């Protein structure tokens, strides 16, 4: 088996995309997981979506209101996550997000994929 060498990435040198209004991200995609640095401007409204990936949303700064479960169902609820907190989202759980202030999130996904639920809109 070939030796795997560690890589050092600089967020500022990675390509940035903007899949929806008021949201930009930069991603590192590995073999078994993916990490995204996501910048949400105040008022960013990420519509409800789901994906097979398990996700950890690490709020580095700001405040985001997440909708969990399918909207309009008894299972739907909202949680507010602030800087220093982590939201764990199991795979296939419908979720949405609304930035109540400028926010920076590290999203960790497993397994990795070139797209997530917001890319399919």
Image: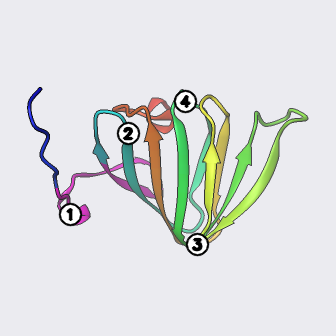
User: Residue drawn 85% across and 35% down?
Assistant: 72
Relative to 119, does residue 67 appear above or below in the rendering?
Answer: below
Q: Does the magenta stretch include residue 20?
A: yes
How would you rate the neighbour count of disc 3 (Cα within 10 Å): few for under 14, some for 14-19, many for 20 or more? Answer: some
Residue 34 vs residue 39, the one in the foreground: 34
Residue 88 location, x and y as percent?
62, 48
Q: Which comes sooner in the sequence, label 1 or label 3?
A: 1
Q: Name the residue under label 3.
A: 83
Residue 79 location, x and y as percent?
76, 57
How would you rate the neighbour count of disc 1 (Cα within 10 Å): few for under 14, some for 14-19, many for 20 or more? Answer: few
Disc 4 and disc 2: Cα gap in Å?
14 Å
- Magenta stretch: give its range: 8-27
| Relative horizontal placement of residue 55, taking residue 23 as reference (left or right) | right
Dot 1 falls on a residue whose secondary structure is: loop
User: Residue drawn 54% across and 30% down?
Assistant: 51
Disc 3 and disc 4: Cα gap in Å?
24 Å
Disc 1 and disc 4: Cα gap in Å?
27 Å
Q: Name the residue under label 4.
A: 51
How would you rate the neighbour count of disc 4 (Cα within 10 Å): few for under 14, some for 14-19, many for 20 or more? Answer: some
Q: Mark 2 points at which residue?
A: 33
User: Residue drawn 28% across and 39% down?
Assistant: 30
Disc 1 and disc 3: Cα gap in Å?
22 Å
Whether residues under marks 1 and 4 lie with C-beta atoms below 8 angstroms apart, the answer is no
Q: Mark 1 points at which residue?
A: 10
């Amino acid at each position: 088996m070939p030796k795997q060498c560690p890589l050092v990435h600089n967020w500022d040198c990675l390509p940035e995309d903007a899949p929806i209004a008021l949201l930009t991200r930069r991603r590192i995609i590995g073999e078994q997981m993916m990490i995204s640095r996501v910048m949400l401007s105040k008022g960013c409204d990420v519509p409800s979506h789901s994906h097979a990936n398990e996700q950890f949303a690490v709020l580095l700064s700001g405040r985001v209101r997440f909708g969990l479960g399918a909207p309009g169902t008894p299972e739907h609820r909202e949680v507010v996550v602030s800087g220093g907190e982590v939201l764990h989202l199991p795979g296939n759980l419908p979720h949405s997000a609304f930035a109540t202030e400028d926010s920076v999130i590290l999203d960790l996904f497993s397994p990795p994929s070139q797209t997530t639920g917001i890319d399919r809109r």
